[in-house]
Image (cartoon, coloured by chain):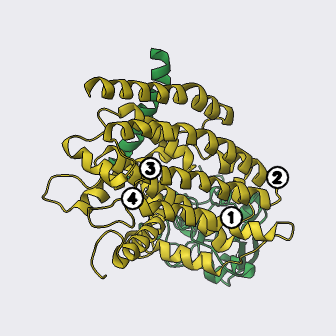
């Protein structure tokens, strides 16, 4: 029971702890990297190179007043931030970190992740709706439209990988990449999934549901204290999830030359994508709301369908 | 088609690369309390009253600084020693009003009032922003090392009669007919 194997207690506990701790640490990592990319230093005062900034933030956020506005729908208001944490943590269940570490070997892993991503939209929608605030409502309206439309071709862009590997099981998808990562045959699918992943985790440049400069803080305008903290950490968990998914689906997961253990290869690949997401935040401006929608429906959706069509034709032709 | 690719992919990639390169550029930040910045000698900061090379107060309480001050933050009262030297009985600067414009330094005929490169003057009590003469007077000569008003000025004080100042001719005796 206390050894690393798929589904063992040790495996589950370490995944849960490491993933949540990593998401919290990302708050500091992101601020530091943003600082470097903007020619400043970022938080470097608390602890060694500012690494205890997370602890300071946590103390602050726990001791803040956890206020529920009197005009809010109390039950939904409290429920919404919990949904995003639960849903994203559930998605980690099907991610194969190494041959030994993982929670479950589901043969519908890809579908499970997509289903959980769809449920994640409820968190944002309910949070904005129950706040009974105009900015929050606008934010959740935008979130609903954005997440629903980007989910469509997020799924379709993954079908190319599924066609090539012949499996919905993420672990088998990694194993079939032993003789070549899917980034080469599926580079268009990768780009579409990358863009859809940013939109799905509503990170900048697609943070339209919470655009501070336009609609205050969007759907979490009324949230404070640890409830806001859960939205915040949930966003970083989503970032880790999308990076892990890109690693698993397109970059061969734990596979790599044998001089490093599999978990290091996985972390390195995922880390590069986490850094890339932060770089996008530092570099790219936010598109307008209607630009985002028309870009998705008129450009990315046909492109992902064409990609699926060509991949299917090639696979059929070489069979 | 090329325009579309250029707009959607290429320009974004160029931006990303440009920002990524900043990782290897030295940060502009000066970590101020840890790294004190270089302060220029003629910076207009905290006001001091200097002394002449003999160690006497330079201020002769002429009130020109108080007149020049656009925010009226300088208050002083003239008095005199027994040997004829003028000096301020009190000299008070309200730094909560002072705008560090330096007009007082320009107005001062004796180089007594000077602005220094110190700017760290925050206080918790507003009353602590009012500095009296004891707080303002320093022991040194400030920016002008050799200047001594009573040596070069024609003003008569004990121990220095008319015409005895540096570079000063004896006063003309208007009642004499000699050339």
The subunit carrying tag 4 is A
Q: Which residue is mark 2?
A: A134
Circle 2 residues within 10 Å: few <14, some 14–19, many ≥20: some
Taking A261 as reference, is A299 above or below it? Answer: above
Taking B94 as reference, is B18 above or below it? Answer: above
Same chain, labels 2 and 1? yes
Residue A158: which quarter of the image? top left
Residue A80 disc label: 1
Q: Which residue is mark 4?
A: A95
B98 or B1, nearer to the observer: B1
Mark 4 → mark 2, Cα distance in angstroms: 38 Å
- 4 vs 2, front mark: 4
Q: Earlier in the sequence, mark 1 or mark 4?
A: 1
Same chain, labels 3 and 2? yes
- The residue at the point 43 percent across, 38 percent down is A159
- 2 vs 1, front mark: 1
């Amino acid at each position: 029971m206390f050894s690393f194997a798929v589904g063992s207690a040790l495996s589950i506990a370490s995944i849960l702890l490491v993933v949540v701790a990593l998401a919290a640490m990302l708050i500091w990592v992101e601020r530091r990297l943003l600082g470097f990319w903007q020619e400043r230093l970022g938080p470097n005062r608390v602890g060694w190179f500012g690494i205890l900034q997370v602890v300071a933030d946590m103390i602050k956020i726990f001791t803040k007043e956890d206020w529920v506005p009197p005009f809010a729908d109390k039950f939904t208001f409290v429920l919404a931030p919990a949904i995003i944490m639960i849903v994203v943590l559930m998605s980690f269940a099907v991610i194969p970190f190494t041959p030994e570490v993982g929670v479950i070997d589901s043969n519908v892993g890809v579908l499970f992740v997509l289903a959980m991503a769809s449920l994640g939209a409820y968190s944002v929608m309910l949070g904005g709706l129950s706040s009974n605030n105009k900015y929050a409502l606008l934010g959740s309206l935008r979130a609903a439209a954005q997440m629903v439309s980007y989910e469509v071709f997020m799924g379709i862009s993954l079908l190319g990988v599924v066609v090539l590997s012949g499996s919905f099981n993420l672990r088998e998808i990694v194993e079939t990449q032993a003789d070549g990562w899917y980034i080469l045959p599926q580079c268009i699918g990768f780009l579409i999934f990358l863009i859809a992943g940013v939109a799905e985790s509503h990170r900048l440049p697609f943070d339209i549901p919470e655009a501070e400069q336009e609609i205050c803080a969007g759907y979490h305008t009324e949230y404070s204290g640890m409830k806001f903290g859960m939205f915040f950490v949930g966003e970083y968990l989503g970032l880790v999830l999308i990076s892990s998914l890109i690693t698993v689906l397109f970059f061969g997961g734990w596979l790599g030359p044998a001089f490093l253990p599999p978990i290091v290869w996985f972390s390195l690949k995922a880390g590069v994508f986490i850094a890339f997401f932060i770089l996008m935040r530092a570099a790219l401006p936010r598109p307008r709301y209607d630009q985002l929608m028309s870009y998705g429906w008129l450009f990315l959706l046909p492109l992902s369908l064409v990609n699926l069509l060509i991949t299917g034709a090639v696979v059929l032709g070489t069979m | 088609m090329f325009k579309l690719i250029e707009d959607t992919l290429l320009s974004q990639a160029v931006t990303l690369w440009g920002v990524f390169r900043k990782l290897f550029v030295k940060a502009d930040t000066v970590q101020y309390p840890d790294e004190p910045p270089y302060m220029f000698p003629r910076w207009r900061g905290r006001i001091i009253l200097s002394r002449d090379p003999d160690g006497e107060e330079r201020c002769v309480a002429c009130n020109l600084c108080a007149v020049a001050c656009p925010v009226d933050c300088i208050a002083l009262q003239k008095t005199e020693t027994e040997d004829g030297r003028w000096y301020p009985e009190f000299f008070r600067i309200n730094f909560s009003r002072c705008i560090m414009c330096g007009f007082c330094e320009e107005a001062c005929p004796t180089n007594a009032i000077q602005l220094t490169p110190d700017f760290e003057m925050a206080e918790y009590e507003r009353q602590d922003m009012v500095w009296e003469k004891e707080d303002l007077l320093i022991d040194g000569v400030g920016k002008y090392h050799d200047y001594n008003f009573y040596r070069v000025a024609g003003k008569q004080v004990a121990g220095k009669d008319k015409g005895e100042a540096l570079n000063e001719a004896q006063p003309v005796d208007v009642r004499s007919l000699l050339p």
